[in-house]
Image (spheres, rainbow, N blue to C red):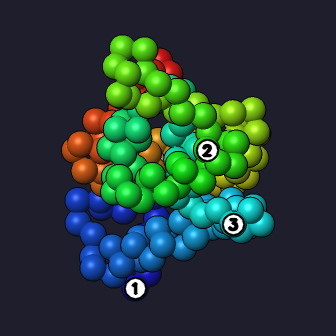
Amino acid sequence: MAELQGGENLLFLTDEQLRQGIEAMFFAYQGFTADPDRILATMAYGRAHHRAMHFIARIPGTTVTNLLAILDVTKQSLNRVLRTLIEDGLVESRIGNADKRERNLYLTEAGAALERKLSDAQRSRMRAAYRAAGPQSVAGFRRVLEAMMEPEMRRRYNAIRERDA
């Protein structure tokens, strides 16, 4: 099937066009995670460690409960990741001010440096892709990603974005 140019009718996509989009998403995700994966592999960490550090960096002082909701993982899984990051001196867990049962999470100086290194690799890849695609494509891509989010995840995503506004 010939590829349609920019005027593609977005209200009607063939199964083949959808399949191509799904496959592009799989391969793009592999590229997006490849650089951080190489860095993490040298440290015996994985993507879960990166995701936790990313959101702790984005929301300093976030609670374990909030991080569980954002990452949509089990408490056991997150505890395993956080225990490693805390033991290795990358994350600090502080008792909450308002509620002593809460644990607020912060990156240490070493944690912030590692998170920056991991995110710099992804920012570089995203910057190059965005430049190649152009501003209209970037805006459209973001709308597509947001439309694919579950409503609760979109709410959390918007809450994080609003913090920056």
**What separation in Å lies between label 2 and label 1 (alpha carbons)?**
53 Å
Neighbour tally class for label 2: few under 14, some 14-19, many 20 plus, Cα within 10 Å: some
Query: Which of the labelled discs sits on residue 86, or is there none?
Result: 2
Depth check, front residue: 150 or 18: 150
Residue indicated by mark 1: 1
Q: Which mark is residue 35?
A: none
Label whose residue precedes the other's in the sequence (3 or 2)? 3
Would residue 34 be found to the left or right of residue 23 on screen? right
Amino acid on which disc 2 is placed: Ile
Q: Position of residue 109 (x, y in %)?
A: 75, 32
Which residue does the numbered mark 3 point to in the structure image?
A: 44
Residue type highlighted by circle 3? Ala
As displayed, is residue 85 above or below residue 2? above
* Image point (36%, 14%), residue name: 98
With 137 as the anchor, is 76 left or right in this view? left
Secondary structure beneath dot 1 equals loop
Foreground label between 2 and 1: 2
